[in-house]
């Protein structure tokens, strides 16, 4: 059976990048799916729009991999919501992903930026 | 069903989660000042396809693979139901293949692979003797060799001997005669079975003068004692004397043979042995870590000392001479081999055939799959273009394969259960341990494994082919890119040829057997017996200790029977035609032919009583029979068969034999008073043996005390306690059974009357072996024919599907539809012709194995072979005509426009 084609984001996020963003968002405390999407949109100054078709599969995948855990609670405005929180394994994963990301951006930045202090 | 419920629950939760998300988005937009309707519409737009979101999310869940598999299976089942012809053919093919193999494998497992049910059964061996001077002929041991072995061997922990016999049982119930065994104390010590009740024999019980005791089989215990727990200590009358029941053995104790119902102690007397007679089955439990080769050398050295221990072998021969004449060698063989017998190799051959048939079935189904897959190339291509992944397409194929294999396995399992039930109900049919046969974990496990293998095999074979094609090209050309891959086509063709070859050989085999059956039915058995009833009677030793008593009682029985209303003639015989046993084969001396070597003119010696010849309908050719002469029948008279007269005097009228004198071991001369027709004594297929008949009162049967030992032994063998009675009635012979029983019970209620059957049944039973083999082979042949036809159909249908476009073009260019069909049929028939040629060769090669079962027909009988060929050709014509017929209905316009 055909699997439906993947949703595309305005800025195409690689799977690992989205995971990193979700984990990073949850570092500040438990949050529901809408809240996570909102948080990412606001903090990226509207640059990163996470669509539901990408968000929920990612959340459920992270949950399956035991990096985040979910439970149902009642929110401030009396709505039943599914709150996701970081697990210890998720915290370790976040640290690893972060350092990988930092090394990557540093390396990419190094390639893109004009070489400083070189003897060109 | 926990799993689906949890799945539904999670689904509902996911829906709720997404719903909440949506509501929050709408609420936020309203809070930012949008109108509620606009907010909702915008959120919906932003949100996208909710079902798709759910589906993608679900695929992340654990166990999502199972869900997908379920979807594949549902889809595959729907697809298969849409093409019932393909589905039925494939299911039947796989079912027959799987069923056949599992049934045979279950038998092989139970009979050959399972260890014997005795403790440490790998140390159990049977010890027959082979006579090297007689071409390695294997027989049982003599009492002398067993005693020598028991005394001198060092490699066996314990040895046991058994003697197969029959005994009369009588108490307050109907007397009966049952198969029994006399065994030494060591016998059960070798096997060590745990009795259901009581115990086995102990030392004192097999020495002369021991207490009379018996051990019952489970079957006899249930039948005769209603499985009473307090049977131990009860008394059972065996051979007219009371025996104490000391134990009950479970039904799987099937030694010395399958039929044994009770065991009695065997008392061997070292002071009175008979080394020249082989009657005792010997089994041994070897010491731990003694290998059979060492044991054989050890046993052989014990045998070498036999002449020192027992100098006389009987028959006036010294043991040393006897051993020099026969050159006996001890054989040490795993007990399992003895239990299984020579059926082992037959079973392995059957197993190989079963595996081959399943392989062929798989290949056939793969071909059918291809035919179907080719028809669906466009569908596949469309799916691929719409984004179906490779995995998705693979999943669909495998799902179809698995659904078919599962349906086939269900059918196969049903066939196995039915087959095994039939096998174990149809008696042991010469195959030991079949009583233990049942569908068990092994069978189920095998079916499961086969299902997976077959399902994957069929679908992946077909898929491997699809994947070779360029999807885009297929879409563009509607199958034009699909030209026949020559190599594959050739492989498929050789497979069909092989199938036809196999089908031909099996059909020819069953055809030959069927014709043998008809030929056998046409054989004159030598007796009329249309209205005759046969039954056996046995006189217990306790009531009739002396041969004279036995003879007198037999005479009385005959008198009673003769006077029953409706009886035209009654008689008794030691040997009923077509039934085993009851005759002794002896050297004969002919007074006027001293030139004939007695040892080379072996004659069957049969005792008869009353008007036996008339009762069974054996005609008198010359002279008269005993019953027409002096009432006390005490003269030394004999009646011989026509075959005897022919062999001795070359006379086919029988008159030359009258008045001549003959003798068997001993000085007494017997005068021939009559010659009777030849009856087929052993089987319908075997020519009648030269036979001499003596009256039960013949003085020759009662040798004086000083008569030669040889005469005494022969006389004892020729005057048995168990005879077969025959009565001829005017109506239906079955109607007189109760009268016969009553008459004998009236005479002596302890005499068992058993095996009552009309002579017509005796005749039918003698055909049973041929009938059984013909039926079995016929079944295999039908299976092979079916598979062969499916194979031919598959290949032709596949060709049609490959060449649809070509055929359409030809038709458009003016070819007649009939021509197209003929072309395709011709292709199928070429394969069949090749298969038939191979089949004839295979038949000629294999029929040597069948020769023993054939009668009056040559293994290369042209009529049978041509009939089989005609049948195969007819079946193949239909199989190839069906798809060819479809091809002629191809609409050229639609094929060409379909580009």
Image (tube, coloured by chain):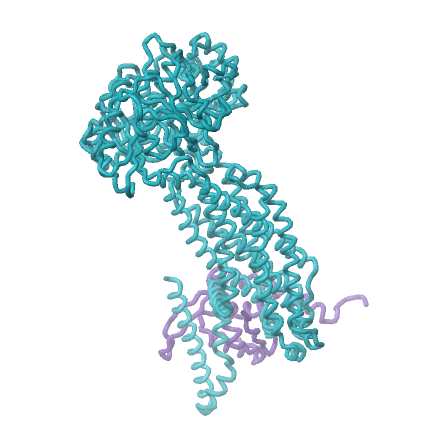
Q: Which residue is more in the foreground, B681 or B745?
A: B681
Can you see residue B60? no
Q: Which residue is more in the foreground, B871 or B179?
A: B871
Q: Percent position (x, y) of residue B234? A: 20, 28
Give the tally of numbered discs. Answer: 0
Q: Percent position (x, y) of residue A91? A: 50, 62
Q: Is residue A25 above or below residue B778?
A: below
Which residue is at the far right?
A: A120
Can you see residue A100? yes
Q: Percent position (x, y) of residue A14? A: 60, 70
Q: Is residue B668 above or below residue B572?
A: above
**Which quarter of the rendering shows the N terminus of chain B?**
bottom left
Q: Percent position (x, y) of residue B453? A: 53, 53
**Which quarter of the rendering shows the C terminus of chain B?**
bottom right
Position of residue B268 in the picture relative to residue B72 (left or right): left
Q: Is residue B655 above or below residue B16?
A: above
Residue at x 39% of width, y 28% of height = B581
Task: Identify the image quadrant of residue B382.
Answer: bottom right
Q: Which residue is more in the foreground, B885 or A37?
A: B885
Q: Colour of chain B?
A: cyan
Query: Which chain is tinted purple?
Result: A
Which residue is at the far bottom?
A: B35
Task: Identify the image quadrant of residue B552.
Answer: top left
């Amino acid at each position: 059976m055909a699997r439906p084609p993947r949703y595309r984001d305005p800025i195409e996020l690689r799977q690992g990048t989205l995971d990193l963003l979700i984990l990073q968002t949850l570092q500040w405390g438990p949050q529901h799916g809408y809240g996570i999407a909102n948080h990412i949109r606001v903090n990226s100054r509207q640059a990163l729009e996470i669509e539901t078709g990408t968000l929920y599969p990612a959340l459920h995948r992270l949950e399956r991999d035991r990096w985040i855990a979910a439970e149902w609670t009642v929110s401030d405005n009396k709505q039943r919501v599914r709150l996701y929180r970081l697990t210890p394994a998720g915290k370790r994963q976040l640290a690893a992903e972060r350092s990988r990301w930092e090394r990557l951006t540093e390396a990419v930045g190094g390639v893109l930026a004009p070489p400083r202090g070189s003897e060109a | 069903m926990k799993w689906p419920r949890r799945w539904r629950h999670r689904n509902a939760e996911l829906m709720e989660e997404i719903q909440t998300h949506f509501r929050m988005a709408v609420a936020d937009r309203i809070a930012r000042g949008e109108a509620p309707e606009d907010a909702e519409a915008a959120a919906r737009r932003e949100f996208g396809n909710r079902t798709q979101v759910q589906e993608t999310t679900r695929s992340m869940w654990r166990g999502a693979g199972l869900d997908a598999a379920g979807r594949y299976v549902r889809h595959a089942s729907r697809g298969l139901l849409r093409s019932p012809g393909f589905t039925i053919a494939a299911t039947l093919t796989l079912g027959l293949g799987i069923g056949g193999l599992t049934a045979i494998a279950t038998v092989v497992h139970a009979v050959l692979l399972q260890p014997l049910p005795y403790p440490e059964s790998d140390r159990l061996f049977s010890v027959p003797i082979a006579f090297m001077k007689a071409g390695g002929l294997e027989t049982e041991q003599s009492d002398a060799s067993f005693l020598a072995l028991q005394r001198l061997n060092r490699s066996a922990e314990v040895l046991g001997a058994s003697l197969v016999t029959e005994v009369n049982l009588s108490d307050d119930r109907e007397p009966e005669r049952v198969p029994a065994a006399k065994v030494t104390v060591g016998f059960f010590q070798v096997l060590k079975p745990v009795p259901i009740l009581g115990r086995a024999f102990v030392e004192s019980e097999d020495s002369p003068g021991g207490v009379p005791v018996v051990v019952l089989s489970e079957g006899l215990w249930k039948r005769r004692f209603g499985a009473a727990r307090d049977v131990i200590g009860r008394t059972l009358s065996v051979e007219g004397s009371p025996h104490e029941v000391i134990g009950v053995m479970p039904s799987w104790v099937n030694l010395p043979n399958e039929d044994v119902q009770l065991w009695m102690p065997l008392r061997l007397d070292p002071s009175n042995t008979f080394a020249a007679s082989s009657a005792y089955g010997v089994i041994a439990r070897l010491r731990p870590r003694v290998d059979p080769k060492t044991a054989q050398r050890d046993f052989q050295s014990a045998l070498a000392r036999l002449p020192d221990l027992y100098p006389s072998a009987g028959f006036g021969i010294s043991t040393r001479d006897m051993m020099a004449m026969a050159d006996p060698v001890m054989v040490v063989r795993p007990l399992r081999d003895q239990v299984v017998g020579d059926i082992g190799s037959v079973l392995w051959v059957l197993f190989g055939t079963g595996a081959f048939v399943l392989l062929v079935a798989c290949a056939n189904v793969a071909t059918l799959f291809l035919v179907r897959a080719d028809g669906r190339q466009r569908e596949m291509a469309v799916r691929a273009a719409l984004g179906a992944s490779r995995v998705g397409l693979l999943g669909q194929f495998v799902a179809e394969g698995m659904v078919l294999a599962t349906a086939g396995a269900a059918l196969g399992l049903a066939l196995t259960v039915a087959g095994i039930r039939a096998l174990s109900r149809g008696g042991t049919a010469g195959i030991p341990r079949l009583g233990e046969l049942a569908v068990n974990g092994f069978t189920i496990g095998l079916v499961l494994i086969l299902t997976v293998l077959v399902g994957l095999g069929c679908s992946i074979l077909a898929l491997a082919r699809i994947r070779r094609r360029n999807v885009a090209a297929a879409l563009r050309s509607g199958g034009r890119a699909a030209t026949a891959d020559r190599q594959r086509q050739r492989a498929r063709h050789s497979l069909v040829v092989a199938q036809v070859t196999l089908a031909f050989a099996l059909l020819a085999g069953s055809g030959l057997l069927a014709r043998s059956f008809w030929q056998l039915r046409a054989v004159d058995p030598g007796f009329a017996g249309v209205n005759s009833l046969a039954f056996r009677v046995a006189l217990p030793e306790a009531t009739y200790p002396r041969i004279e008593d036995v003879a007198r009682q037999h005479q009385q029985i005959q008198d009673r029977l003769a006077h029953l209303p409706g009886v035209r003639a009654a008689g008794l015989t030691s040997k009923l035609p077509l039934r085993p046993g009851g005759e002794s084969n002896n050297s004969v001396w002919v007074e006027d032919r001293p030139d004939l070597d007695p040892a080379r003119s072996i004659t069957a010696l049969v005792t008869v009583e009353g008007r036996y010849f008339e009762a069974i309908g054996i005609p008198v050719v010359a002279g008269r029979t005993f019953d027409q002469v002096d009432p006390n029948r005490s003269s030394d008279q004999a009646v011989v068969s026509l075959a005897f007269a022919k062999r001795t005097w070359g006379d086919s009228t029988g008159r030359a034999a009258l008045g001549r004198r003959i003798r068997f071991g001993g000085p007494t001369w017997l005068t021939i008073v009559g010659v009777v027709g030849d009856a087929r004594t052993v089987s319908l297929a075997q020519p009648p043996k030269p036979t001499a008949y003596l009256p039960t009162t013949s003085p020759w049967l009662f040798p004086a005390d000083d008569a030669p030992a040889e005469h005494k032994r022969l006389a004892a063998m020729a005057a048995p306690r168990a005879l077969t009675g025959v009565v001829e009635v005017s109506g239906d012979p079955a109607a007189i059974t109760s009268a016969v029983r009553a008459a004998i019970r009236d005479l002596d209620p302890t005499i068992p009357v058993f095996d009552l059957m009309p002579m017509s049944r005796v005749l039918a039973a003698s055909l049973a072996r041929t009938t059984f083999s013909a039926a079995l082979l016929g079944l295999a042949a039908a299976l092979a024919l079916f598979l062969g036809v499916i194979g031919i159909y598959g290949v032709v249908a596949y060709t049609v599907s490959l060449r649809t476009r070509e055929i359409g073009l030809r038709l458009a260019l003016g070819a007649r539809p009939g021509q197209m069909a003929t072309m395709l049929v011709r292709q199928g028939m070429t394969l069949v012709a090749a298969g038939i040629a191979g089949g004839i060769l295979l038949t000629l090669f294999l029929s040597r194995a069948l020769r023993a079962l054939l009668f009056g027909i040559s293994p290369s009988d042209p009529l049978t072979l041509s009939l089989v060929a005609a049948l195969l050709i007819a079946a193949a014509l239909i199989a190839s005509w069906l798809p060819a017929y479809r091809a002629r209905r191809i609409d050229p316009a639609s094929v060409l426009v379909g580009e």
